[in-house]
Amino acid sequence: MKGDRIFEGGTRFFAILLILIVGLIGLLLFKESLPAIRKFGWQFPFRSVWDPVAEDFGALPFIYGTVVSSMLALLIAVPLSLGVAIFLSELAPPYLRTPVAFLIELLAAIPSIIYGLWGLFFLVPWLRTSVEPFLIKWFGLLPFFQGPPYGIGMLAAGVILSIMIIPIISSISREVLLAVPNDQREGALALGATRWETTRMAVLRFGKPGLLGAIFLGLGRAMGETMAVTMVIGNRPEISFSLLAPGHTMASVIANEFTEASGEVYLSSLMGVGLALFAVTLVVNAGARALVWKVGGKAGRT
Amino acid sequence: MMSRDSRRHWVNRIMLGLSLAAALVSMLPLFLIFFHILSHGLGSLNWDFFTHMPQPVGETGGGFANAIMGSLILLVLACAFGLPIGIFGGIYLSEYGGRKAAEAVRFASDLLNGTPSIVVGMFAYTILVRPMHHFSALAGGAALGIIMIPTILSTTETMMRMVPRALREGALALGLPYWKTLVYVVLKAARGGIVTGILLAVARIAGETAPLLFTALGNQFWSTDLKQPIAALPLQIFTYAISPYDDWHQQAWAGATVLIALVLLLNIVSRLFIRNRLAGKRS
């Protein structure tokens, strides 16, 4: 019937439009970064200069900042999130599960800008006056904890990011653990294993690919996070081993400099940074989904 | 010397205790953020905040009226861009698409879901801001609309699939053409769930700031012109938070209170929607 064909055509049109949009995002970013690629060649990601006055650009400081801040975030968030997931799937009495899961998922609903505001006015001053002087005093010999305690910097960014990705990693890990068949647990318990041994040997081992996927999804989110990081990281395009020093990430440099970028090469270099960010998050997310699907079924589709 | 068994039981207790501690520590930031927002925000929140325009630096008072209006306009625009693609795309996935075609659409949606919002902002800048030579509400709305699509698409698909087959067969048996069956029977039955998806998507984009930085840009004045830069609540919070003025910081906290109230309200309402649906199903 005619109406049927029109309706089906209409839905197909919008579905194809979605594919077009995603394709265009990649294509346009590539096209826009061509002037920078032409000028700096394929070394662009490995050059550490960022000098708008001399129109000399390289993405290394931002790639470094993104990698370090997200690794720091994972370092804090992964043990906590796995703890939460184990608590919710293996330990908590049923009446606690829903409210605790709800409260932690609320963290995911808080907008990035609010994390930034809170980070700027509470986290940063707290790091500056309490945490960083302590780190400098006791661990100052390590290259990670040298220099004055600014408060803003890589450490602040890592802490904020970890709070933001805990809900993602923990809720997906929890679904992965819940998908582990009960036979696994019963078998281990029957052999005389304690609760923890059962969890470690039967549950965590079984769900390993899925947990890895959950961690990757958190990593993908951490790398693309913009506002909160921009507000606390200090925004300086330098590479410093110290976590106390200000830095920059791929997302934060775009947020900071995009509207000010005058000149073709400057804008194009920022587009190049955007392209790199798009490509990296794409790879990380694709890998994450493949891993989660292996165990959790549809858990990764949120 | 501890026996092997008692050591195992100690390890058991310690690890279980650590997982409880992890749950407590993870909830701590939530309480801290709420506490700080309420203790700073409520005090600075007053009637002027909703009804007045921002004041120039140095003058106290004033409010976010233009930003609240701007956010509403941006959300409506975003729905205009995002809803058709999300809903019709979802219907296509659940009702028509062959396996290959559906996989391609779902893959694109997953990619989009993982794309950082600031990258979507760059995209909107390239296709809308530059050709039009103007930062505009339109470009901001388009960027937010694109961000909404994956959430709406996947809830629409899931909800359409959940509608029992018998309902479709009944409608078809009465002689309704397939598309009318879909629109008047299946879509109507799936409505509650789809509305939930839309509310969640709106809650997510209401707080989005990064893609607006170089699309909607922000505006210190009253503007409802879709082709001009427009103010938005999260953008205004950002501008005020990084300013050096105490008075503006207070306003930023008030803005944050309003924003978080809006986001939480949308989240809780959508959860109630889901619960009612499930309750309705059981009876």
Image (tube, helix red, strand yellow):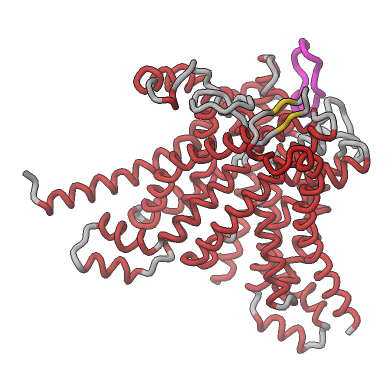
Q: Nearer the viewer, residue A76 or B232?
A: A76
Residue B68 magenta:
yes
Q: Nearer the viewer, residue A210 or B79?
A: A210
**Residue A200 position within the rendered picture, expressed as x and y whole percent measured from the top left:** 31, 57
**Residue A175 position within the rendered picture, expressed as x and y whole percent measured from the top left:** 47, 60
Q: Nearer the viewer, residue A140 or B215?
A: A140
Report the span colored magenta.
B49-71
In percent of the image, x 68 and y 65: which residue is there?
B106
**Residue A257 position within the rendered picture, expressed as x and y whole percent measured from the top left:** 74, 30
Q: Residue furthest top?
A: B58
Instruction: Give above or below for B233 relative to B127.
Output: above
Callout count: 0
In percent of the image, x 50 and y 33: which residue is there?
A159
Residue A298 in view: yes
Instruction: Give above or below for B144 relative to A63.
Output: below
Q: Is A48 placed left or right of A136 in the picture?
A: right
Residue B236 magenta:
no
**Residue A46 position within the rendered picture, expressed as x and y whole percent measured from the top left:** 63, 38
Instruction: Give above or below for A32 relative to A282.
Output: above
In percent of the image, x 68 and y 22: which residue is there?
B242
Residue B68 in view: no
In percent of the image, x 66 and y 20: which residue is there?
B249
Q: Which image quadrant: the N terminus of chain A?
A: bottom right
Q: Is A216 placed left or right of B269 in the picture?
A: left
Q: Which image quadrant: the C terminus of chain A?
A: bottom right
Q: Is A281 placed left or right of A26 in the picture?
A: left
Q: Is B14 placed left or right of A5 in the picture?
A: left
Instruction: Give above or below for B243 relative to A39.
Output: above
